[in-house]
Amino acid sequence: MSLAPQELENSASKYAAEAIKLDSQGSRGMAIQSYQRAIEALVKLVQIYPDYKLNKVYMERANAYQNRIKALQMSHGLDDDSPAPAESASAGGNGRSEPANGKSGSSHSGGGKSSGNVETLKADFDDLVMKDKPKVSWDEVIGLDDAKRAIRESIVYPMKRPDLFPLGWPRGILLYGPPGCGKTLLAAAAAAEIDGYFINVDAASMMSKWLGEAEKNISKLFKMARSLNENEGVPVLLFIDEIDSLLGQRNSEVGGEVRVKNQFLTEMDGINGKSKESQLYVIGATNKPWSLEAGFLRRFQKRIYVTLPDNASRTNLFSQYTKPLNTEGSLKIEELAKITEGYSASDVKDICQSVQLRVVNELFESGKAMEAGANPRPVGNNDFKEILKIRKPSVSVDMIRAYMRWSDQFKAL
């Protein structure tokens, strides 16, 4: 049975954070191994879910990690404890050490390639970001009506009728909530509706020592966003994922981390203090809002709780994900929605995929899979119930309570 998308995302994030830490400590061989594991998790995610809307983001990150592996190997040579060049990072699995997406930086800002400057061990700044005009409709964001309304009020309506907002509008938005509930899709859908640029940044990579001094990267990032907004005259949404790794509280901080926070604070104040006609927005996303320092919260005038799907949303999700499947006529979508309370949107997708894998596995075990016209049997209610016995929600009750407590104090729709 394949891993769920959230498991692979979490695994990639864990290995990437570990790699960054080891890299900054000079543990070259171990850092390469962790970067490689992060790449493998991202590539596996794309291979298992080829139509997932965020695959482009994942491959950009895998490409950045692969570039760092090359820089370490070329600059220092391979020690005895260093692994060979990554073989599985290539989506084609051909054994060559290539960028994870099989090409170099085709969707990066400005279309540039990695700098290849192995002497300074700095990846090209373009490897940090993905600049694109997404094609994601609001219909693809199931449920989350409060979040959609808040984002439309802050981004979509001011763009269409700025004259209706004499007091200006919010330009800092924080999306928080459990993983797998659609925070990135929300931001992408907003960018698509206003035909604006969507700049997607992984904050954990931004903080990485090997990507250069982080405060300089912050400055470059905001400069690029302002340039697009002012020179091309189009709205820009700067989406910073895992923003808690950038602005989170720490028991002890080194000077660089303090400078990064101060730089970000300066840039945010600059955006909020600009003319009320500015169409540059900063959207931060986090699964751990309680780790953010209180001083930064007021820069995010909108703080939106992206919740688990309710019953109606789960019904919609099951309808969407079972539509391409061969199902029994007696399949009761409404019943499935009721018994999956507490499951995230990505959990629902994983359940539907697991049911499909179940009947495909039966076909192969029967020995008839390669026969002409052989197809899996239709899936029914019992198949879903069997899967639900072994697949539990990815979000715990205690975690939901923590989100509710934080929302009671800081939520701002």
Image (cartoon, rainbow, N blue to C red):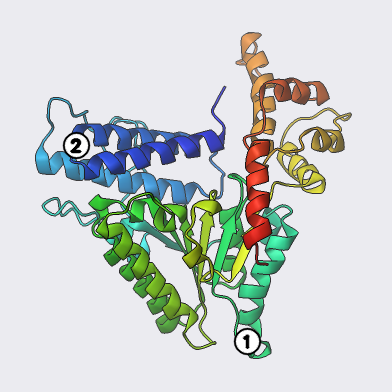
Q: Image quarter for residue 321?
A: top right
Residue 357, given in percent of the width and then of the height, sits at: 64, 24
Instruction: Report the quarter where the N terminus lies.
Output: top right
Instruction: Report the quarter where the C terminus lies.
Output: bottom right
Camera-side residue of 85 and 260: 260
Picture layout, residue 39 above or below residue 274:
above
Q: Residues within 10 Å of mark 1 (few under 14, many from 20)?
A: some
Q: Which is closer to the viewer, label 1 or label 2?
A: 2
Camera-side residue of 266 and 36: 266
Picture layout, residue 89 above or below residue 225:
above
Residue 411, given in percent of the width and then of the height, sits at: 65, 62
Q: Image quarter for residue 91?
A: top left
Residue 16, given in percent of the width and then of the height, sits at: 36, 41
Residue 205, given in percent of the width and then of the height, sits at: 35, 51
Q: Residues within 10 Å of mark 2 (few under 14, many from 20)?
A: many
Labels 1 and 2: the sequence-earlier one: 2
Q: Tell me how far mark 1 sits from mark 2, CA to CA.
A: 52 Å
Under mark 1, the amino acid is Pro
Q: Can residue 190 be seen in this view?
A: yes
Q: Is residue 201 left or right of residue 196?
A: left
**Regarding mark 1 in the picture, which secondary structure is present there?**
helix
Which numbered tag is attached to residue 328?
A: none
Which numbered tag is attached to residue 28?
A: 2
Q: Is residue 213 left or right of residue 7?
A: left
Which residue does the image show at 56% across and 45% down from the upper left?
52
**Regarding mark 2 in the picture, which secondary structure is present there?**
helix
Q: In this view, does 323 lie to the left or right of 135?
A: right
Which residue does the image show at 74% across and 37% down from the upper left?
322
CB under 8 Å between discs 1 and 2: no
- Total labels: the figure holds 2
Which numbered tag is attached to residue 162?
A: 1
Under mark 2, the amino acid is Arg
